[in-house]
Amino acid sequence: MTHYSMYINGEWVGKDYETKAVINPANQKEVGTVPNGGKDDTTRAIDAAHKAFQSWSRTTAYERADYLEKFYHLILDHEEDLAKTMTIEMGKPINESRGEVNYAASFIKWFAEEGKRIYGETIPAHVDGKRLQVWKKPVGVVASITPWNFPAAMLTRKMGPALAAGCTIVIKPSSDSPITAIKLMELCEKAGFPKGVVNLVTGPSSEIGDTVMSDKRVRKVTFTGSTEVGKTLIRQSADDVKNLSLELGGHAPLIVLDDANVGVAVKGVMASKFRNAGQTCICANRVYVQSGIYDKFVEKFSEAVTKLKVGDGLNEEVDIGPLINKAGLEKVQHHVDNAVNSGASVVVGGKTREEGEGVFYEPTVLKDVDPNMVIMNEETFGPVAPVQKIETDAEAVKLANDTEYGLAAYVFTENVARGMQLIEQLEYGIVGWNDGGPSAAQVPFGGFKESGIGREGGHEGIEAFIESQYVSIGMN
Ligand code: NAP
């Protein structure tokens, strides 16, 4: 078993530290250990990033793009190793892990290019003898905190724009899946990024979090994870008015209207709901189907779900890997039990799956659910699709928006005018219309309401790492 190290100021640190084990959720075996770093290591990483910022921020966008291009190609060259690492440490089926490696790489490629398009502005003056300009500057040292469910892509979606903009970065990966991130650091080293530009620390989240939040040299914190932790960071950011970007939880509605193509809708909900065993922030968490098509949809959807194969994600045939841990499994079971005890029926699945020591849940379809059930009100993070019958478009909109979340929503209808009218009323940052997989590097990703602040990806994604400096130039 390998003991991995932290990466601080271009050096591998923590070989002799106390360790924390990383557990494969498919069999509960240790897959490696990481150092239990803490406050001192985080401060050293901030020291290094702060020092490196002085020179990295002065390199040209073209030089930074060259480093990022090298990193991009190295990620693709190591696709298989990164994919296996991801599957072993957090359970995602291997084909999805390969997909995530490519998705992760796409952010590095996109932002390598986007960094060259950080344009300033010249604004017409209101009086003679002045020139009004806006200059663009990197925000400074960035701290990145990421979740376990997309251990590569959630990190590169932050690293790409931060580094392209001229910022340096201190990374804190999830304790459940830190090895993928450490392997990405090995590739950064190979790509030749100067010392201190990229740093990674592992260890207790609150200690590392408190350290970055209380260090005034960290000018920006970019976080992906739960809304609960996001709110803690907002509170902590008040003391020195730290710049925050937050990608938080979701509770996505998926609406199927009676003029939908059932085949397209079933394909869409399969893609959206069961990817990563339902453990994604934009997973459809509640399905609303209009009464005219409800029975047919439930039948076809259930048929497709029955075919999903559950097991260790390293098996190429597997569609549904384990859940991340026992707590995740218990939450899913609680949502199903609560629904069934309140009148829902299980059409497929509905229970845990015994597979050795693994933490598996059967892909599940529930019908006859109602809006009061817990599953219709909380993020489930598991392979369970509750399907509620609805009558009207207005009812769909009302139910969809009746949540504090606003990340992703899905709509299935073949009627363009109806689709547009409905989507205009949805309070969601991302909408898939006849599409269960809307994510891509070149589009803005982020949520309304308590699903976050800011956008990642697209041309908007780099703005989070740039300050505008307005310069008024007197010409007399
Ligand atoms: P989490 O518990 O909020 O953890 C996310 C990260 O925050 C981890 O690195 C965690 O470290 C760290 N953390 C925990 N407490 C902290 C604190 N007090 N200060 C600083 N950092 C702290 O979320 P998760 O369970 O890993 O991920 C699942 C959640 O992420 C879901 O709600 C999902 O919807 C959301 N998510 C959102 C997006 C999006 O783009 N909007 C994408 C993916 C996931 P440890 O692991 O060491 O505890």
Image: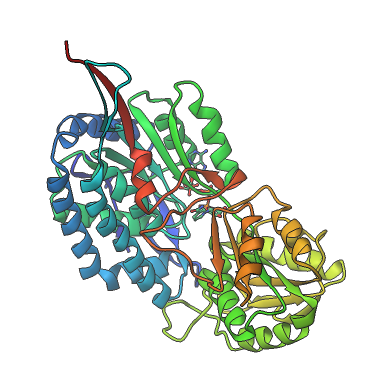
Give residue 48's quadrant in the image.
top left
Q: Is residue 363 left or right of residue 180?
A: right
Q: Is residue 335 visible in this depiction of the protein?
A: yes
Residue 132 screen position, x and y as percent: 27, 23
Q: Which of 447 and 217 is in front in this view?
A: 447
Q: In this view, does 122 lie above or below 275?
A: above
Task: Tally the numbered discs.
Answer: 0
Residue 179 screen position, x and y as percent: 35, 58
Q: Is residue 42 above or below residue 324?
A: above
Tell me which residue sits at (50%, 67%) in the image: 25
Q: In this view, does 54 lie to the left or right of 429?
A: left
Q: In this view, does 4 lie above or below 418?
A: above
Tell me which residue sits at (46%, 56%) in the image: 148
Quadrant of the snapshot with the C terminus: top left
Tell me which residue sits at (51%, 80%) in the image: 319
Residue at the extreme front of the image, as rendered: 128
Residue 204 screen position, x and y as percent: 45, 41
Q: Is residue 357 visible in this depiction of the protein?
A: no
Q: Nearer the viewer, residue 377 or 428?
A: 428
Residue 449 screen position, x and y as percent: 61, 44
Q: Is residue 209 above or below residue 101?
A: above
Q: Is residue 110 left or right of residue 328?
A: left
Quadrant of the snapshot with the N terminus: bottom left
Tell me which residue sits at (34%, 34%) in the image: 42
Judging from the image, the colouring scheme is rainbow
Residue at the extreme top of the image, as rendered: 476
Give residue 32's quadrant in the image.
bottom left
Q: In this view, does 342 lie to the left or right of 142?
A: right
